[in-house]
């Protein structure tokens, strides 16, 4: 049976406009394996419930149906998904736009995703989560994957991204352009390839981050790789040091 998690405990409503709800995932929830966060998972065809086909990067020809995922979390734009601290051996695909995924604010430690987090929706905020460790499950080996085909803006802040086999924050997708990629107050440490990369980004903002010791799995590994079609770069108050090939590599 599919694990379906959608525990809404807070909703803010003004008139009939729902601003957002808080979806709390306790440490003992069946949050495991391959996790899909989306607004819906099935359609009705001739009175039969049929799984939806969705475009994801880690899939056969870029498509999986929703029954392929072990766990479903229903979330809608404006919702906040709150995780208990602890380690979760999962790979996560986010398809709902404009949601926030974070750790319980009262917890001293972060929720640690021991796998890949793939963001396939616009306006997502990842705040105070960890993405760490070697490849497992369906992982690509990257920590956070940002799909430029569907994202205009994304914010990654207060996150700890360490010891992934390849890149800590990695841009995916063969086409598309991101208007703003914002990485704030994050630690990108000891990832096998790069701390992070960027391509086809109009405005790249990296502030208050520690980006060190990346590149142990690739001789050309760097701290920050600025690739093609990055128009504007804003970097300040960062510590970027001791990365294998270069601390910041800007493709001319």
Image (cartoon, rainbow, N blue to C red):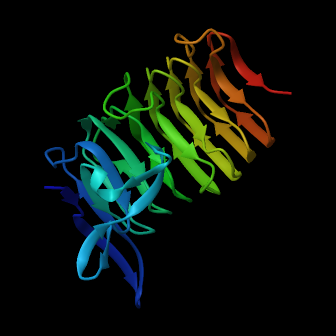
**Quadrant showing the C terminus:** top right
Position of 170 with respect to 40 (left or right) is right
Nearest the eye: 51 or 80: 51
Residue 124, x across and y down, in percent: 51, 55
Q: Quadrant of residue 153?
A: bottom right
**Residue 105 seen in the figure:** no
Farthest residue toward the right?
Answer: 252
Q: Quadrant of residue 15?
A: bottom left
Farthest residue toward the bottom?
Answer: 15
Residue 185, x across and y down, in percent: 55, 36
The residue positioned 50% from the left and 46% from the top of the image is: 61
188 in relation to 235, above or below: above
Position of 109 with respect to 59 (left or right) is left
Position of 119 with respect to 49 (left or right) is right
169 in relation to 67, above or below: above
169 in relation to 102, above or below: above
Residue 126, x across and y down, in percent: 47, 48
43 in relation to 97, above or below: below
**Residue 55 seen in the figure:** yes
Residue 214, x across and y down, in percent: 56, 16
Position of 3 with respect to 75 (left or right) is left
How many numbered circles does the render carry?
A: 0
The residue positioned 41% from the left and 61% from the top of the image is: 53
The residue positioned 19% from the left and 50% from the top of the image is: 26
Q: Quadrant of residue 182?
A: top right
Nearest the eye: 112 or 198: 198
Nearest the eye: 173 or 247: 173
**Quadrant showing the N terminus:** bottom left
């Amino acid at each position: 049976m599919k694990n379906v998690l959608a525990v809404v405990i807070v909703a803010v409503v003004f008139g009939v406009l729902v601003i957002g709800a808080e979806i709390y995932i306790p440490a003992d929830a069946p949050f495991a394996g391959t996790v899909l966060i989306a607004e819906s998972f099935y359609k009705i065809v001739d009175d039969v419930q049929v799984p939806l086909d969705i475009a994801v990067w880690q899939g056969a020809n870029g498509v999986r149906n929703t029954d392929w995922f072990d766990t479903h979390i229903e979330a809608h734009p404006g919702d906040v998904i709150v995780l208990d601290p602890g380690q979760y051996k999962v790979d996560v695909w986010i398809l709902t736009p404009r949601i926030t995924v974070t750790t319980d604010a009262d917890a001293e430690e972060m929720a640690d995703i021991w796998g890949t987090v793939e963001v396939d929706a616009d306006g997502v905020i990842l705040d105070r989560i960890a993405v760490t460790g070697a490849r497992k499950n369906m992982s690509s080996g990257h920590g956070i994957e940002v799909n430029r085909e569907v994202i205009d803006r994304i914010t990654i802040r207060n996150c700890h991204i360490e010891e992934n086999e390849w890149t800590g924050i990695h841009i995916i997708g063969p086409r598309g352009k991101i208007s703003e990629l914002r990485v704030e107050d994050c630690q990108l440490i000891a990832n096998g390839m790069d701390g992070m990369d960027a391509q086809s980004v109009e405005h790249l903002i990296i502030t208050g981050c520690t980006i060190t010791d990346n590149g142990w799995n690739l001789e050309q590994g760097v701290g920050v790789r600025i690739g093609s079609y990055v128009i504007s770069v804003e970097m300040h108050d960062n510590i970027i040091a001791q990365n294998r090939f270069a601390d910041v590599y800007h493709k001319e």
